[in-house]
Image (spheres, rainbow, N blue to C red):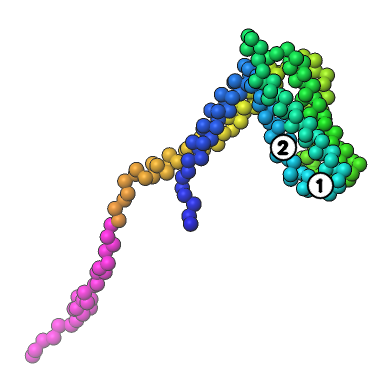
């Protein structure tokens, strides 16, 4: 089966780009949405790891340590989601969550990095370079959130907005390339097709020339 010359993936990418920009703007202007999105991301990342991770670990102590870390992450994600839907009378977040948010993030990232390095250092769990680098970043983020006293949900909201816009720009350019190919295909459909000229199957055969035309024969005389 031949691959089609066009597709509608560009339309999906345009829609996703618009959604990303909209969500990014909403996140930047609303602390509640920052709480909810952060909580959902942490909860999903925690819960979806349970079966594959525990199935692939060979040591019982590693399974126990990772399961405890996963459950703590899921609880923190649930609390963040709850905090996002909890509003005071004027529509803002209730005061306790403002101070706890950065500590939730600090604990989550630091715990993730700590469990990883405990597994690789003391229990000889092998790993890859990208995974190692990611958990170095996780430990660093945990330390930054712990000491950054002025950090709040709005700060993370602006970071999310820039990430969303960057993703939307990427999807937009990718979708533009697909749309361009689609329009080229549409243009080819609307161009008039050249009529095939019937090939002349008749081959002109040279009629055999008389010898007199090619070679002048001597005249004969009757005496």
Quadrant hosting residue 123: top right
**Relative to 11, 204 lies left or right:** left
Residue 158, visible in the rendered structure = no
Looking at the image, which residue is at 84% across and 46% down?
126
Residues 147 and 85: in front is 85
Earlier sequence position, callout 2 versus callout 1 = 2
Residue most extreme to the left: 223
Q: Residues within 10 Å of mark 1 (few under 14, many from 20)?
A: few
Tag 1's secondary structure?
loop
Q: Position of residue 125 (x, y in %)?
A: 85, 45
**Relative to 202, 191 lies left or right:** right
Indicate the quadrant containing the C terminus: top left, top right, bottom left or bottom right. bottom left
Would you name the residue on which mark 1 appears? 57
Image position of 150 with respect to 203: above or below:
above
Numbered range of the magenta stretch: 197-223
Would you name the residue on which mark 2 appears? 47
**How many marks do you count on the picture?**
2
Q: Position of residue 214 (x, y in %)?
A: 23, 76
Q: Position of residue 59 (x, y in %)?
A: 86, 47
Q: Is residue 63 highlighted in magenta?
A: no
Tag 2's secondary structure?
helix
């Amino acid at each position: 089966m031949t691959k089609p010359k066009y597709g509608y993936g560009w339309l999906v990418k345009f829609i996703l780009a618009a959604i990303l920009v909209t969500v990014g703007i909403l996140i930047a202007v609303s602390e509640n949405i920052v709480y909810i999105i952060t909580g959902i991301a942490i909860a999903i990342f925690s819960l979806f790891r349970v079966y594959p991770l525990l199935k692939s670990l060979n040591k019982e102590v590693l399974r126990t340590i990772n399961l405890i870390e996963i459950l703590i992450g899921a609880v923190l994600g649930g609390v963040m989601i709850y905090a996002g839907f909890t509003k005071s009378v004027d529509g803002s977040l209730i005061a306790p969550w403002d101070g706890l948010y950065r500590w939730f993030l600090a604990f989550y990232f630091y715990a993730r990095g700590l469990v990883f390095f405990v597994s690789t250092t003391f229990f000889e769990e092998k790993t890859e370079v990208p995974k190692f680098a990611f958990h170095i970043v996780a430990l660093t983020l945990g330390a930054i959130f712990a000491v950054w006293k002025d950090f709040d949900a709005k700060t993370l909201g602006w970071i999310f907005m820039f990430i969303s816009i960057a993703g939307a720009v990427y999807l937009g350019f990718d979708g533009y390339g697909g749309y361009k190919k689609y329009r080229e295909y549409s243009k080819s459909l609307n161009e008039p097709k050249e009529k095939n000229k019937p090939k002349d199957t008749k081959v002109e055969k040279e009629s055999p020339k008389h010898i007199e035309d090619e070679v002048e024969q001597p005249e004969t005389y009757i005496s």
